[in-house]
Image (cartoon, rainbow, N blue to C red):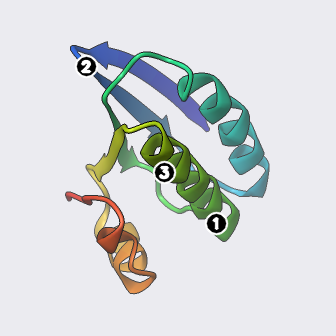
Amino acid sequence: MELNIAQRNSSLVIEIIGAVDNESAEELKNHFQDIIERDFNEAIFNLELVPFITSSGIGKLLVFYKNTLSRGKNMRVKGISEDLFELFKSIKLDKLFPIEK
């Protein structure tokens, strides 16, 4: 798994490349702790190149979401595959933050 981060005005675009398994979910957790300290209003996750994500990876996204919300920031997901979109909808993540295909 790779992570690319780009600042675009007041937004951070976080591109995840590759599968998010249990090991890479722990890696994400470490990155997320650093990212949350940055100056941004919205975190935009691009998951276009993520073929699958484990429950541990989803858990790390939820912790990141909770941290962004508590700091008055927003989060959304874009560029998500149909399979991940259906998974995220089935566990009602689309009720927490915007998810765009």
Labels 1 and 3 touching (C-beta < 8 A) = no
Query: Which structural element holds mark 2?
Result: loop
Query: Which structural element holds mark 3?
Result: helix
Please give the name of the residue rendered at 43% of the width and 47% of the height, measured from the top-left corner.
Answer: 69
Q: Position of residue 50 (x, y in %)?
A: 46, 51
Which part of the image, by quadrant, shows the C terminus?
bottom left
Mark sitting earlier along the chain (1/2): 2
Q: Amino acid at mark 2?
A: Ser
Which part of the image, by quadrant, shows the N terminus?
top right
Q: Amino acid at mark 1?
A: Thr
Residue 93 vertical position relative to residue 28 in the rendered view, above or below: below
Please give the name of the residue rendered at 54% of the width and 29% of the height, measured from the top-left corner.
Answer: 36
* In this rendering, position of residue 93 left or right of residue 31: left
Mark drawn on residue 86: none
Count the numbered circles shown: 3
Say which residue label 3 marks.
65
Quadrant in which residue 35 is drawn: top right
User: How much space separates mark 3 and mark 2, taking CA atoms?
Assistant: 17 Å
Say which residue label 2 marks.
10
